[in-house]
Amino acid sequence: MTESLNQLLADLHTERERTWDAADLQVNIDQRRRLVEEAPRRRFVQSGDFVAPFELHKVGGERLTRDGLLADGPAVLVFFRFAGCPACNLAIPYYDRQLYPQLQQWGVPLVAVSPQVPERLIEIQTRHALKLHVASDLGNQLAQRFGIVYQFDQASQQAALAKGPGIGVITGTGTWELPQPTVVVIGQDQRVHFAQVSPDWLVRTEASPILEAVQALLPTQTNGPLRNAVGY
């Protein structure tokens, strides 16, 4: 049976319903609902968009550039919030299991991207022994260009500060801004061929459409059947 990311995320919400304080849970639900209702969808990255040069700072010190990632074919970027985000700790390992093996076989880089500073992103990579690239989009520069950045609403800011430091301290960015979970497939032509933005961070892109989008960009003789991918 194929593993479902959205079932994992639904299970997380069910657990929160059982264990969280009702007021805290409602703040979380209201923030996610507002993000969906007010999503500036026309600003979101779209298929066909040209991707100008960018640079990401990989955990460990390496720089990942647009041209370097696209040197041999397409690349996949998965934007997530921060290393301590519970939903991200389900989503990024899922992509590592369900995308990385097939993409590696095809020679396609997979990069998990967060604005959190690189030295703090080490946590999620080591916790899950991730094989994909984990990199920082310093200052949300690329996320801003893709139109996927949001800010904590007032209730969420107050709830966060009641429990500890603000998200800007946790991420090292000094702001309340985070990227909405997003998957972008960039072709060697430097254009977006697949983009899906999830304003509700408990609803995210499954592996299957991502693999299908990448496969469509590969030479026929090298892409192979998707049924050989992990989880298929």
Image (cartoon, rainbow, N blue to C red):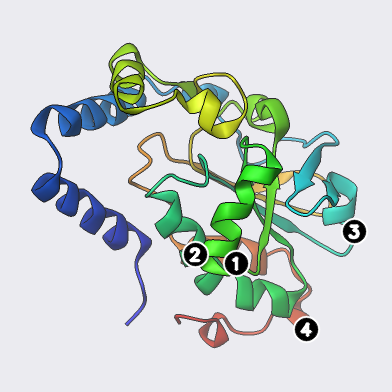
The tag earlier along the polypeptide, 4 or 2, is 2
Residue 32 coordinates in the image, percent (x, y): 30, 31
Residue under label 1, please give it: 130
Mark 2 neighbour class, 10 Å CA radius: few under 14, some 14 to 19, many 20 or more: many
Q: Are marks 4 and 1 in contact (CB under 8 Å)?
A: no
Question: Exactly how many numbered labels are in the figure?
Answer: 4
Q: Residue furthest top?
A: 154
Mark 1 neighbour class, 10 Å CA radius: few under 14, some 14 to 19, many 20 or more: some
In the picture, the quarter occupied by the C terminus is bottom left
Residue 96 coordinates in the image, percent (x, y): 55, 68
Is 144 displayed left or right of 196 in the figure?
Answer: right
Secondary element at tag 3: loop
Q: Which mark is residue 71?
A: 3
Type of residue at label 3?
Answer: Ala
- The reply to whether residue 222 is visible in this rendering is yes
Q: Image point 47% across, 27% down: which residue?
A: 167
Q: Image point 77% across, 81% down: which residue?
A: 222
Type of residue at label 2?
Answer: Pro
Secondary element at tag 4: helix
Type of residue at label 1?
Answer: Leu
Q: CA distance from mark 1 to mark 2?
A: 7 Å
Say if 230 sits above or below 20 in the image: below
Is 62 displayed left or right of 152 in the figure?
Answer: right
Frontmost residue, 55 versus 108? 55
Is 197 displayed left or right of 136 in the figure?
Answer: left
Residue under label 2, please give it: 93
Q: Image point 82% across, 62% down: which residue?
A: 73
